[in-house]
RNA sequence: CGGGACGUGGCGCAGCCUGGUAGCGCACCGGCUUUGGGUGCCGGGGGUCGCCGGUUCGAAUCCGGCCGUCCCGACCA
């Protein structure tokens, strides 16, 4: 295994994170503070996330559209809480085409406002509802402390925006996205056992009446918000005059939702599954699931490697042939850093016995596999690896989550992991007190693990942690 | 924006204290050698020492200002 190639997690976790990003060729810092260049290998991971999410979003009934990057500054001001929440981090264009603009254009930090304006035009009748839209876009938020993938000035994301005839319908849709699109994607594709919960008023999205979240635990015990789904009540509908006529010919304001997931998920993936040898990419999201490598050249080895790769590709496995002309050890270390789940090592010795060596990045270890059974073996390995990653992440979360009964106990637990504590023990005051030590209430959950359906659930538990 | 650390070839660093015109490891290029876990040897290319100003015969080195990066917070997907 690779030694001394990257900083061990235990020595310095943030440094480890940056080393992985560099050595696995995921991203680079951009030239302007806080910006990010996503390199091909990192982008390939994002593209697969996008494709999987896009499929699920479409199944949920939303259609893709595209709205402009520039938003009139006045739009942002129409929703008081929204503008208050986003003002500090806006990038504003004041000059263009060589002259001062009459109205400054804000580079979108999120698109509720423009989309609200247009939805208001399109929605006239209850028959136009629900209106379910999604867009894939870049957004800009001038964050104070950027970190590659986790918080960059510009990031890529998906933002869904919907309008409904009733509060109930909007609520159910936000919940559906949260549970059936986001959580299932994270569990089934990213192998991340996210906790689903409801944000406290303090942590809620600016302008929302309710925010649902998916929280993941990273390798250092900190939490990462992987995606959120908001009920916006009638706040934006009111601000943009989005009204419609009901069946009874009465004018009513629509109820809206918005929901988003971003390139931050790539950072979450790294910190959830990575280890001291580098990245470990869950098989279903891996752009390269199997790397076929020539371990030592010889009679017929290259042809065998090529045909093994082709067989895997034909069987629907995302395989790639590594025919680079560098030492085997180096290529093996590269594959480990990049977290390719399975390596098939082909050499004269194995071929003489009609077999190849299969090296597993996730479970670890190597085994000799007869050529005839390779495709089945690999397919099986990939399925097992997904489950193993999920189980490992879940075990860590459970090990590092303490059931606390006092705020001090919870704060103590949050230095190495998470704590759950009855929300009535914490309350708004306790939440503020924890915040002084950089500990936040990540979300509220019910004792049975379900998501609270109201803000004043007397039995709700607060999940508290440090977070990214 | 506060507190701390740091800016020297692509990456990681030494040199700075005690000024004299830049060096090491890795990476890169060429050759031979090796390819079953970062091969070995030989040769080679690449840096206005973050920027601006000051002191000095002379500044990577001393002084001032600015900019940037990283870590810990505040803000946040």
Image (spheres, coloured by chain):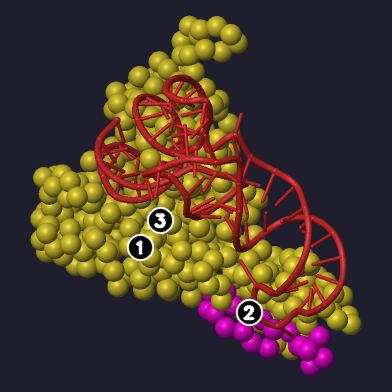
* Quarter-of-image position of residue A307: bottom right
**Circle 2 sits in a helix, a strand or a loop, which is it?**
strand
Q: Is residue A441 above or below residue B42?
A: above
Residue position for label 2: A359
Residue A300 inside the magenta-drawn segment: no
**Location of residue A468 in the rendering, given as x and y in whole percent from the top left corner:** 36, 50
Residue position for label 3: A14
Query: Residue visible at 63% across and 79% down?
Result: A359
Determine the colour of chain B.
red
Mark positioned earlier in the residue sequence (2 or 3): 3
Q: Chain of mark 1?
A: A
Q: Chain of mark 3?
A: A
Tag in front: 2 or 3: 3
C-alpha gap between disc 2 and disc 1 = 27 Å
- Comparing A383 with A269, the one in front is A269
Q: Confirm or deny contact between disc 1 and disc 3 (CB under 8 A).
A: no
Residue position for label 1: A220
**Location of residue A121 in the rendering, given as x and y in whole percent from the top left corner:** 49, 20
Query: Residue visible at 38% across and 40% down?
Result: A145
């Amino acid at each position: 295994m690779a030694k001394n190639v990257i900083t061990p997690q235990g020595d310095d976790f943030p440094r480890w994170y940056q080393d992985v990003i560099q050595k696995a060729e995921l991203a680079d810092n951009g030239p302007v503070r806080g910006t990010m260049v996503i390199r091909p290998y990192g982008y390939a991971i994002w593209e697969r996330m996008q494709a999987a999410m896009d499929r699920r979003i479409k199944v949920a009934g939303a259609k893709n559209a595209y709205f402009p990057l520039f938003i009139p500054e006045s739009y942002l001001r129409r929703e008081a809480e929204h503008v208050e929440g986003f003002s500090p981090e806006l990038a504003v264009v004041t000059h263009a085409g060589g002259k001062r603009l009459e109205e400054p254009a804000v580079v979108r930090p999120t698109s509720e406002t423009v989309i609200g304006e247009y939805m208001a035009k399109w929605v006239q009748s209850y028959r136009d509802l629900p209106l379910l839209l999604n867009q894939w876009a870049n957004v800009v938020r001038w964050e104070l402390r950027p970190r590659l993938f986790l918080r960059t000035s510009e990031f890529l994301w998906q933002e869904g925006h919907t309008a409904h005839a009733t509060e109930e319908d909007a609520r159910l849709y936000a919940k559906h996205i949260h549970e059936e699109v986001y959580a299932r994607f994270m569990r089934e594709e990213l192998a991340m056992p996210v906790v689903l919960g409801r944000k406290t008023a303090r942590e809620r999205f600016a302008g929302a009446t309710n925010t649902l979240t998916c929280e993941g635990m990273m390798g250092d015990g900190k939490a990462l918000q992987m995606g959120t789904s908001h009920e916006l009540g009638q706040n934006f509908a009111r601000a943009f005059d989005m009204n419609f006529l009901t069946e009874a010919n009465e004018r009513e304001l629509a109820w809206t939702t918005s929901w988003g997931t971003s390139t931050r998920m790539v950072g979450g993936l790294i910190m959830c599954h990575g280890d001291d040898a580098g990245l470990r990419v869950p098989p279903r999201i891996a752009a390269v699931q199997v790397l076929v490598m020539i371990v030592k050249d010889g009679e017929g080895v290259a042809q065998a490697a090529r045909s093994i790769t082709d067989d895997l590709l034909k069987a629907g496995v995302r395989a790639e042939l590594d025919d680079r002309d560098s030492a085997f050890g180096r290529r093996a270390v590269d594959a480990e850093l990049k977290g390719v789940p399975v390596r098939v090592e082909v050499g004269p010795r194995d071929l003489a016995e009609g077999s190849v060596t299969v090296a597993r990045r996730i479970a670890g270890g190597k085994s000799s596999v007869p050529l005839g059974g390779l495709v089945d073996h690999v397919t099986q390995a990939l399925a097992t690896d997904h489950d193993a990653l999920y189980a490992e992440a879940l075990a860590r979360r459970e090990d590092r989550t303490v059931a606390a009964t006092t705020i001090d106990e919870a704060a103590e637990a949050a230095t190495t992991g998470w704590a759950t504590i009855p929300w009535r023990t914490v309350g708004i005051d306790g939440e503020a007190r924890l915040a002084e030590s950089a500990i936040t209430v990540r979300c509220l959950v019910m004792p049975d693990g379900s998501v609270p359906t109201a803000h004043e659930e007397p039995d709700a538990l607060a999940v508290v942690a440090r977070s990214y």
